[in-house]
Amino acid sequence: MAGFRASDEHTAAFERDGFFVAPSLLDSVEIGLLADIARADREIATEAYGRADGEGGAVKLLVRNELAEDDIYGAIVRSERIVRTMQRVLDDEVYHYHNKMILKEAKVGGAWAWHQDYGYWYDNGCLLPDMASCLIAVDRATQENGCLQVLAGSHRMGRVNHLEVGDQTGADPERVEAARERFELIHCELQPGDGIFFHANLLHRSDQNHSNHPRWAFICCYNTRRNDPYKESRHPRYSPLDVWPDERIQLVGDAQWRRMQDYAK
Ligand SMILES: O=C(O)CCC(=O)C(=O)O
């Protein structure tokens, strides 16, 4: 679905369920480039860090606040198909809040505790939960390798208190237990390139990966202009986001991959 654009049905699903899946958000060439580049990316290999999951494992990730002009990550974050969709579902101009690569490795990949992203971002000076993320499956995501799980409609609960779970911050377990009785649990099984757009108050989690298959995902997080944080924090305040044509994902990705191969010679 190169050139994906959100429809009224997508907007309605986002309002009702707090998320929707966009199959083939990145086409096979684009996701192939992202997977090759990310797996050969020295910064990811050396800088990704672990956070204990409270279940004896650790999640591994690399968060980036800055966007480069010449890499595939920046081209995806700026792509019209994602930015225009975010603007539509959040009903405002959006800017890049940060992006992250989730490295859920085969056999050892850690779990994510139930949480809302706004549970983390609330303390960053964001007054409104008018924020959202787009998760793109780098690898096939299944129940076996710890795909994303969501409680459909739980974003309407508003912000839930968050407490420490291992090195992570998790939503109040009593509230989560009650929410599980009322909101449908969906396992978001995805093919490489599929995307999920989800609201910052949607409760979500994922299991440890005991399978032989890695489950990496790239997540682009956006804030709205009207929700410019009132104070400095670890993620940026508003600055205009340059929106790029969708075709630049492949153009920039191809060039980056060629540079990486030349460098490796
Ligand atoms: O990839 C996952 O399983 C979840 C990641 C997540 O929830 C997050 O980064 O906030």
Image (cartoon, rainbow, N blue to C red):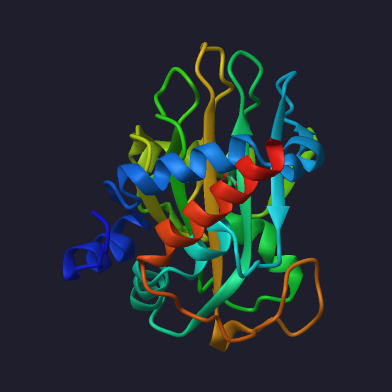
Residue 127 versus residue 173 in the image, above or below? below
Residue at x-position 75% and y-position 70%:
124
Look at the picture and state if 135 lies above or below 252: above
Q: Is residue 42 left or right of residue 133?
A: right
Q: Position of residue 110 (x, y in %)?
A: 65, 26
| Number of numbered discs overlaid on the protein picture | 0
Front-lying residue, 69 or 148: 69
Which quadrant: the N terminus?
A: bottom left
Instruction: Give the quarter of the figure containing the C terminus.
Output: top right
208 left or right of 182? right
Q: Nearer the viewer, residue 222 or 252?
A: 252
Q: From the viewer's perspective, is residue 203 above or below residue 54?
A: below
Q: Quadrant of residue 91?
A: bottom left
Residue drawn at point x = 80 percent, y = 66 percent: 234
What x and y, as percent, mark residue 212? Answer: 52, 11
Residue 241 appears left or right of 62: left
Q: Is residue 132 visible?
A: no
| Residue 66, image x, y percentages | 70, 67
Residue at screen point 47% across, 38% down: 138
Ligand 1 visible in quadrant: top right
> Where's residue 79, x and y in %?
42, 68
Residue at 49% x, 70% y: name it: 78
